Image (cartoon, rainbow, N blue to C red):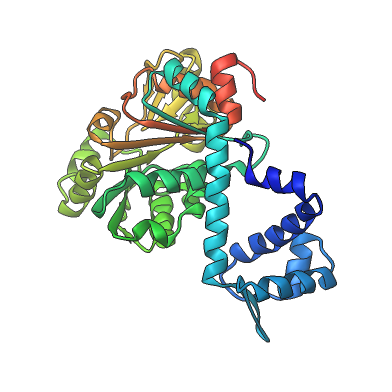
Amino acid sequence: MADIFTIIQSIVPEMSDLLAERLAVLRVLDDVNNRIGRKFISQQTNFTERTVRTILEMLKSQSLVSVNRSGVKLTQQGRDLIVMIDEHVLNQQQHKFYEVEEAVKRKLNIEHCRIVPGDADKDASVYQFLGQVVHLILDKHLPKGDNVVAVTGGFTLSKVAESFTPELSDGRSITFVPSRGGLGSSINIQSNSVGSLMAQRTSSKYIPLFIPENLGKETSEILLKDPMIKDVIDMSKSANCLLLSIGTANVMAERREITDEQQEIIESGHAVGEAFGIFFDSYGETVLRYPRIGLKFKDLSNIPLLLTIVGGSSKAKAVEAFFQKAPSHGWLICDEGLANMVLNGETL
């Protein structure tokens, strides 16, 4: 079935430019919560202020924007329209990638797969599409009522969180919990920070776990006796949903600031990926286990809604290796570049 925008363009070609201009302005307004001026919109869209003024007058007449002396902002009707457009685009994309998704499911032996266009290694805007798909899946599959959503850290999930909205909490009481502790560098992409951002974006609750990841066995056993720490870890293990991502071995080795000895083990063991503190080879076998407190790989089979979100063709080998050991009941949400690399050994 042809895309509705393609049909419009074929019948009324001049409508295409008008539609693109109005959508561009709506997108700028959707990205900010406060009122903004025409000059800012002009800078963001590269339209003249006169063009912006004309577009805003039309959008105002349709009750899509509110304009006063303080500036311009989207009305609720305008925001609803953006959501409708995004859902339509995503549905078209889902139809486009149906056969590829089925092939990835067979190759990785998983039950669910969703693919978005592009390659996050080449285009950072792909993360927005990943976030929108994750949001839609959660909204469809998280039950109404109380929910506990466990979250790993990482750049991918930090970007995915930016697409979350309060609509996810309609009829739900969601508590986000970190899947592991984390203190030190890369604060913004740690499990605590990502979970906190998701809670803020969805008007939900969040329970932090402020402990370092790399602890010795004796220290870990002592901390696990603390009731508050134990409660958070138990919550993550009994969560009805887990959002996780997978990293390449070399990137994660740098991020975790490992020792020279550990680096040698990773290299000599030909590790290709990392998840849950485990560096693994192309067969999914453990090369190095990084000490940590939190959710373990073995806990995944007990979590009903398991979403693995990965962007970028460079992570294809890590994804293939991960799913050799991961439970088959989960989802893979990835981009076109990664999917093609998994299937054919090449990108777009």
Give the percent coordinates (x, y) of residue 51.
82, 68
Tell me if residue 125 comes above or below residue 27 in the rendering. above
Q: Considering depth in this image, is 289 or 338 the residue closer to the camera?
A: 338
Give the percent coordinates (x, y) of residue 64.
61, 70
Residue occupying the far front of the picture: 11
Q: Considering depth in this image, is 15 or 348 the residue closer to the camera?
A: 15
Give the percent coordinates (x, y) of residue 262.
44, 24
Residue occupying the far bottom of the picture: 69
Residue positioned 47% across, 22% down in the render: 102
Quick check: 9 left or right of 315?
right
Residue positioned 71% across, 62% down in the render: 22
Q: Considering depth in this image, is 17 or 328 the residue closer to the camera?
A: 17
Q: Considering depth in this image, is 147 or 115 the residue closer to the camera?
A: 115
Does residue 272 appear anywhere in the picture?
no
Number of numbered discs on residues: 0
Tell me if residue 220 comes above or below residue 250 in the rendering. below
Residue positioned 43% across, 17% down in the render: 106
Tell me if residue 33 comes above or below residue 85 in the rendering. below
Does residue 326 appear anywhere in the picture?
yes
Placement of the C terminus among the 4 image quadrants: top right
Residue positioned 70% across, 43% down in the render: 6
Where is residue 69, by image quadrant?
bottom right
Quick check: 106 left or right of 2?
left
Quick check: 228 left or right of 58?
left
Give the percent coordinates (x, y) of residue 251.
54, 31
Placement of the N terminus among the 4 image quadrants: top right
